[in-house]
Image (cartoon, coloured by chain):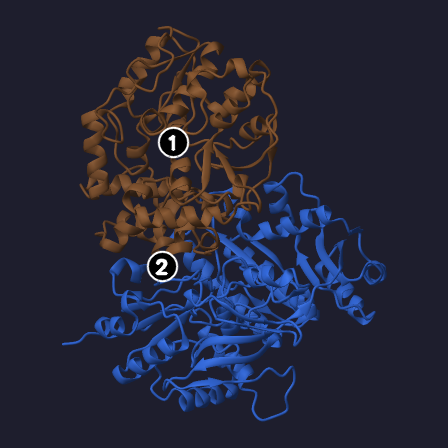
Chain colours: A brown, B blue
Amino acid sequence: MTEELDIREILKCVRCGTCRSVCPVFRELGWESTSARGRLMVAGHLLDGGLPDEAALASLRSCTTCAICREICPAEVDSPRLIEGARRELSSRGLLSEAQLKLKTRIQATGNSLGEARDRLAWMTEKEVPDRAEAVYFAGCLNSYRYPQVAAKTLSIIKPLGVTVLKNERCCGSPLLRTGIAPDTIDHNLEQIRATGAETVITGCAGCYTTLKKDYPPEFEVLSLSEFLEEHISDLKLEPLDITVTYHDPCHMGRHNRIFDPPRRVIEAICNLEEMKGNREEARCCGGGGGVRSGYPDLSLRMARRRLEDLPSNVETIVTTCPLCVKNLSDAGGKAIDLIDLVAQALPEHARGSGSSPGH
Amino acid sequence: MMTLIDDLRRLVGDRATDSSSERLCYSRDASQVRGLPDCVVRPLNAIEVSEIVRLAGRLGVPVTPRGAGTGLAGGAVPVSGGILLDLSGMDRILELDLDDLQVQIEPGVIPERLNWALKEHGFFFPPDPGSSAMCTIGGMIANNASGMRCVKYGTTREHVLDLEVVMADGRVIHTGSRMLKSSAGYDLTRLMVGSEGTLGIITAARLKITPLPRARRLIAASFSTAEAGARAVIEAFSAGIVPSACEILDRTTLSVLSRCNPNLALPKEWDLILFEVDGTEQSTAEEAEKIVSACSSAIAVRIASGKEEMEEIWAARRLVGAAVSRLDSTLSRVYLGEDVGVPISQIPALIARVERIAEEAGIPAMKYGHIGDGNLHAALFIDITDEDRWRALERAADRIHLAALDLGGTVSAEHGIGLARARYMERQWGEGLDLMRSIKRALDPQGILNPGKLGL
């Protein structure tokens, strides 16, 4: 049994049901097994050696690990951690879903979660990067393959600030870790990072950020792109834009890592920011995380549509700091962009490089 | 052969299940009572509920209604198996009739959501249990739930005008009307309120709503004894004040709270009474002054009128439930003996008895509650993996219930009887319980509706 699945921690849940008021999956499905309280009962049963049936598997797999339940739990039960523990238990019993198996095979074969055989660095418009630097940009699978413009803009903006990239980056491990599978790409990435001599790793992906920060050995500082941009905001010479945007807190930037202010400060240095109905600690999940987008695409999209209902009236553009949130909110019909897209629009004319054309 | 689940699926499709883990998730509420249902069904309207109840009648299978499963006495736990009816999906607000001061809702509506909808119109639904963010109004009606502000506005019962109820034979009846008052026959509405699903299944409710007050003020008064605090409460009422909340936090509670939050804005050395008054700026200012006069024996009195200052104090009050497990992760709060009530004047005597009982059991106890209506919450904390501690706690809870009855009180003031407190019904009601049994037999001769509850 995995150490994270601790019976004492599960027993801390007094089944008060407070999680029912916030769980975005429960909001869509309504069965008790899809609330945090229900999931903990299912996990407890698993811990007792119980055999999971279909509903138990769905209960444990449909959690986005968004942690909004942990935020308001009166007993401070860390449900996302326990659910990941239960997923590891399922995985150790060989109980992997089709989506999980596919993901695992893809990452083993190609080093990325999308199964792309193409060159991971094809997005690079800056062909010359130093071998060694103070900081390294970890692009992540989604930005490398699905949002190459975002990766390119990011690098062109932060390269002058002493940043390089990994020659041979692989999946950070997040998609497997969140669904309970041990990834085998971490050591490879570690070697790559060490080879650059960088003391700081910068990433613009919430999943990569939380994984680099919490699942990698603490050999280097991990910064989200928004923190790095905020630190260097005066170097960027941004020009104000006369627009109003809103900001969606990715769960793994906000609640999991408390990065609430840096993206907002960067946005406010550029244009007006109007908050969504649920924001910061109370931001509702876009529905994409925890393996839910790949495992339960319809459910994931329903949650994204629900999140779009939180938009302030008369504001269209949703700025966020996670490619998975961009993807899920866009698929649901939202106009979601990455923070770097906004920054690129605000750069002085001469500083807009080849990677900084608007849109993707 | 058709099985129960096949029959249910024929009625509601995939909103019925007999999955073992789903059944497990519906086998408990927030109490220690357990019971596995055979099937779980999530109906969407009264017709479906009626068909399910008729089916249950034909097969002689128990039906247990459930709202959000936040109950503290096992009321929604299917202790005899059978069909678990999860009504939380029936969550539409059917009608806002502001001119007639009422709304009609389905039973799964969450009170906080109703209050969001009413707020913009300047109204509210006053009963405010601690679980307002997640419980259902159907469950509140079935348990006659209440909360802090019921001292002024009355419990759930005072706000129900009419119920649509599916009876044990499948008939759908109404217990009232749109009238704010009526003098026509038995009060079936009040019979249903607090019946915990033993007489019928509530499928819609018409509720009276109340204009929102424009101002509030909070008075925090510390007393050297709980007795002195209770006297002040009685004096405040005698001075013609009906506070919108009137809470007591004993010194044990306050010292635990101050360990959780070193910046706690409340003195922790004494027993504390919190009075809230609501109304207009002028009326609350006057009433606050009168309360300060009623608190002449207090060691310290403070009036708070700023929103933030009041919120800070109420936030401390809300932390009470979970406070101890935050300090010591091996301790869990167990909800047993947690909801007794006595006449206001007997609160100090009850606090003294609870203190002695807890001390003798070697269990830390925080005493707090709604002193304005005589409702004391005793919070007992143990290591729930230790069986000896469990037994000690059960003995202590039993003694607390008996102490409340001895002081002329009730074993449950707002949480309900369910199974957890069923064994005290005979003692609390005597012959009255026989009458309840007669009513139950008349309305549910087969005994299919939530069997095992209320000590019937």
Coordinates of residue B380 in the picture (x, y in percent): 52, 56
| Chain of the residue that carries numbered disc 2 in the rendered image | A
**Label 1: which secondary element:** helix
Above or below, B76 relative to B180: above
Snapshot quadrant of residue B104 = bottom right
Depth check: give the residue in front, A9 or B192: B192
Above or below, A211 relative to B52: above
Looking at the image, can residue B346 be seen?
no
Depth check: give the residue in front, A212 or A110: A110
Above or below, A299 relative to B36: above
Amino acid, disc 1: Gly
Q: CA distance from mark 2 to mark 1?
A: 28 Å
Q: Is residue B328 left or right of residue B297?
A: left
| Quadrant of the image containing the C terminus of chain B | bottom left
Judged from this view, the residue extending furthest toward the bottom is B185
Coordinates of residue A16 in the picture (x, y in percent): 47, 56
Q: Is residue A266 left or right of residue A42?
A: right
| Chain of the residue that carries numbered disc 1 in the rendered image | A
Q: Is residue B354 left or right of residue B89?
A: right
- At 46% from the left and 86% from the top, the residue drawn is B173
Coordinates of residue B52 in the picture (x, y in percent): 32, 77
Which one is in front in this view, the residue at disc 2 or the one at disc 1?
1
Tell me the residue that label 2 is attached to. A31
* Tag shown at residue B42: none
Tell me the residue that label 1 is attached to. A207
Coordinates of residue B254 in the picture (x, y in percent): 65, 49
Mark 2 crowdedness (10 Å alpha carbons): few <14, some 14-19, many ≥20? many
Work out whether mark 2 precedes mark 1 in sequence or the reverse, and give the earlier one. Answer: 2
Amino acid, disc 2: Trp
Depth check: give the residue in front, A279 or A17: A279
